[in-house]
Image: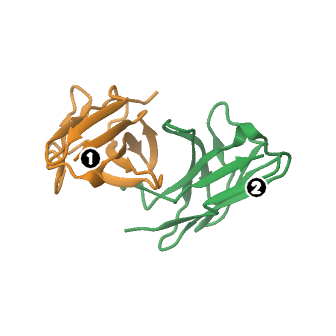
Chain colours: A orange, B green
Amino acid sequence: AQTVTQSQPEMSVQEAETVTLSCTYDTSESDYYLFWYKQPPSRQMILVIRQEAYKQQNATENRFSVNFQKAAKSFSLKISDSQLGDAAMYFCALGSQGNLIFGKGTKLSVKP
Amino acid sequence: GAVVSQHPSRVICKSGTSVKIECRSLDFQATTMFWYRQFPKQSLMLMATSNEGSKATYEQGVEKDKFLINHASLTLSTLTVTSAHPEDSSFYICSAPVDRYTEAFFGQGTRLTVV
């Protein structure tokens, strides 16, 4: 069975600072993808960043980057220069063939 | 990016009635779509996989007769909550991958309230 674990139910960061959200996963698949999704109060799921498991290089998207440790099955998200608009629920997800297994989420608050 | 449209965004129905939720891929063909359920302050739980032209695959614990899924075309999947009860009140979200190598694109979600 595939599992995704987010051990931080809530996190808080000061505006303009950096925060790291943790995620670990377990899978027996060799071909898989990892994602971080953001869910603001509107509840629309928004893709933040995506990492192919076969790629060693960590994905980056502007202020968002990941630390992908395949052997440790760890996939953390770093948000730099945090903005008020970053406040949301963040879900780590493991996927193959489009089907996603989600972690329980981390609620991120950004303090002005 | 790809667009998935889900309707309605909100629906209130009386207990015992049925409600249909539509999920459309607007600019791509989706042979597979996924239906999730999200309770307040919780994560998304996969309910079923909708396959175009064949029967849906349901996750363990999901009642097939209560949550009817139809995927009649390459751009439309529907979820019908039959004989709805208050405990069926939840947020339902559909998603569709463009292909197996991309992320799934999500609909806007449907807030179902059964009174």
Query: Does A17 appear above or below B96?
Result: above
Indicate the position of residue B27 as horizontal and vertical percent values.
47, 74
Chain letter of mark 1 equals: A
Q: Nearer the viewer, mark 1 or mark 2?
A: 2
Which amino acid lies under the numbered mark 1 shown in the image of this protein?
Glu
Where does label 1 land, which residue?
A52
On residue B63, the disc is none
Where does label 2 land, which residue?
B19
Q: Secondary structure at mark 2?
A: strand
Cα separation, mark 1 vs mark 2, equals 38 Å
Indicate the position of residue A60 as horizontal and vertical percent values.
17, 51
Query: Does A71 appear above or below B88?
Result: above
Indicate the position of residue A110 as horizontal and vertical percent values.
26, 44
Chain letter of mark 2 equals: B
Q: Residue at x 53, y 63 (%)?
A: B30
Figure quadrant of residue A85: bottom left
Query: Nearest the camera: A64 or B12?
Result: B12
Which amino acid lies under the numbered mark 2 shown in the image of this protein?
Val
Callout 2 environment at 10 Å: few (<14), some (14 to 19), or many (20+)?
some
Mark 1 near mark 2, Cβ–Cβ under 8 Å? no
Q: Secondary structure at mark 1?
A: strand
Callout 1 environment at 10 Å: few (<14), some (14 to 19), or many (20+)?
some
Figure quadrant of residue B12: bottom right
